[in-house]
Amino acid sequence: MAFTLKLTGDYLLPAISCDCCGGAVTSSGFHLSRLTPDRAYAVDHPTAQVCSEACYEDFVSTQPLDDEWFAIPIDAYLANLVLALDIDVEDVLERERAVSAAEHTRHEAPD
């Protein structure tokens, strides 16, 4: 998967790179996964992220002919992941803000 963290100012923010062109995957991108021959979700197969329908088509065209892929919009994939993991987004963001504030305070304190 092409999920990374990028330093933006004082923060590490998540980013997703397209597995086809290397560009940024935004909410209009797709999460791709292979189907097994019996059309079941293949949990042991790698997944991919692409930034557009064009990259989806390009990516799939480079795969073996007997591979079948399905795409889910990346925003739907991530929203379902948050729900499946029972993540409380507000609690997570509040913890992150508290850690960040503590880190800034520690760095600004005199030695």
Image: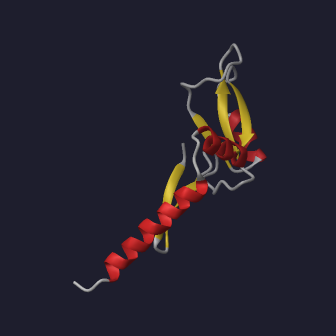
Q: Nearer the viewer, residue 65 or 46?
A: 46
Q: Is residue 50 left or right of residue 9?
A: right
Residue at x 72%, y 44% (from the top left corner): 76
Pick the residue in front: 83 or 62: 83
Q: Is residue 91 above or below residue 34?
A: below
- What colour scheme has been applied to the protein in the rendered image? secondary structure
Furthest-top residue in view? 38
**Tally of numbered discs:** 0
x 53%, y 56%: residue: 92
Relative image position of residue 43 (x, y in whole percent): 57, 25
The quadrant in which the C terminus is found is: bottom left
Could you say where residue 25 lies in the image, as x and y percent from the top left?
Answer: 66, 53
Quadrant including the N terminus: top right
Q: Residue furthest right?
A: 53
Q: Can residue 44 be spotted in the picture?
A: yes
- Residue 12 seen in the figure: no
Q: Is residue 71 above or below residue 25?
A: above
Residue 48: percent from left, percent from top: 61, 39
Residue at point 65%, 27% (across, down): 34
Q: Is residue 111 above or below residue 50?
A: below
Q: Nearer the viewer, residue 71 or 52?
A: 71
Q: Is residue 34 left or right of residue 52?
A: left
Asked whether 93 or 78 is in front, the reply is 93
Image location (x, y in percent) of residue 46 = 56, 32
Q: Could you tell whether 93 is left or right of 33 in the image?
A: left
Identify the residue at horizontal 39%, vertical 76% (top origin). 104
Residue 72: which quarter of the image? top right
Outermost left residue: 111
